[in-house]
Amino acid sequence: QVQLVESGGGSVQAGGSLRLSCAASGYAYSRYCMGWFRQAPGKEREGVAAIDSDGSTSYADSVKGRFTISKDNAKNTLYLQMNSLKPEDTAMYYCAVDPFPGPDILYSCSHSGYWGQGTQVIVSS
């Protein structure tokens, strides 16, 4: 059974940084994507960043140049380094995995059937 546990959220001022972590277990797929999506109250789910099993990455335009996704295969952990945070980054952030990703890994990972409980990020101005 796939389990994803996020941590690292919190409250920061605009311009600050946070690093989210996602401990993954329960899957052993040779090809997959892992990623982060976010959802703010009253807004649609937004794919933020994704990385596939080959290490290729994809980012939403709104976070390019500010966020970096990475994974530690030895620790089965996914990370999201978030710099230069803005109030519009405020949302619940979820880690997700898709064992059968399509060519658009950002879309696949933000619409998969496996995600964690989320971690809250609040950015104040």
Image (cartoon, rainbow, N blue to C red):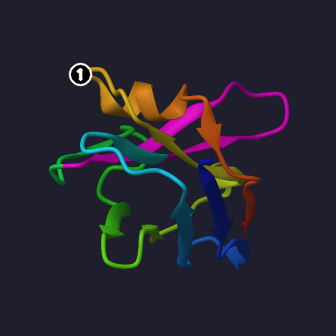
Does residue 103 sit above or below 79 in this rendering?
above
Write the start and end of the magenta stretch as one range: 36-53
Residue 83 location (% of width, % of height): 45, 71
Dot 1 falls on a residue whose secondary structure is loop
The three-letter amino acid code for the residue at tag 1 is Pro
Depicted 100 relative to depicted 2: above or below: above
Q: Which residue is mark 1?
A: 103
Q: Is residue 35 left or right of residue 95?
A: left
Residue 71 is situated, as x and y percent measured from the top left of the image, at 33, 67
Q: Is residue 14 left or right of residue 101?
A: right
Q: Is residue 22 above or below residue 3?
A: below
- The residue nearer to you, when weighing 60 against 21, is 21
- The residue shown at (62%, 70%) is 14
Q: Determine crowd level at label 1: few under 14, some 14-19, many 20+ residues with C-alpha closer than 10 A.
A: few
Magenta-drawn stretch contains 24? no
**Residue at the spot x=76%, y=40% of the render?**
40
Between 6 and 41, the residue placed more toward the observer is: 6
Q: Report the magenta stretch's main SS.
A: strand
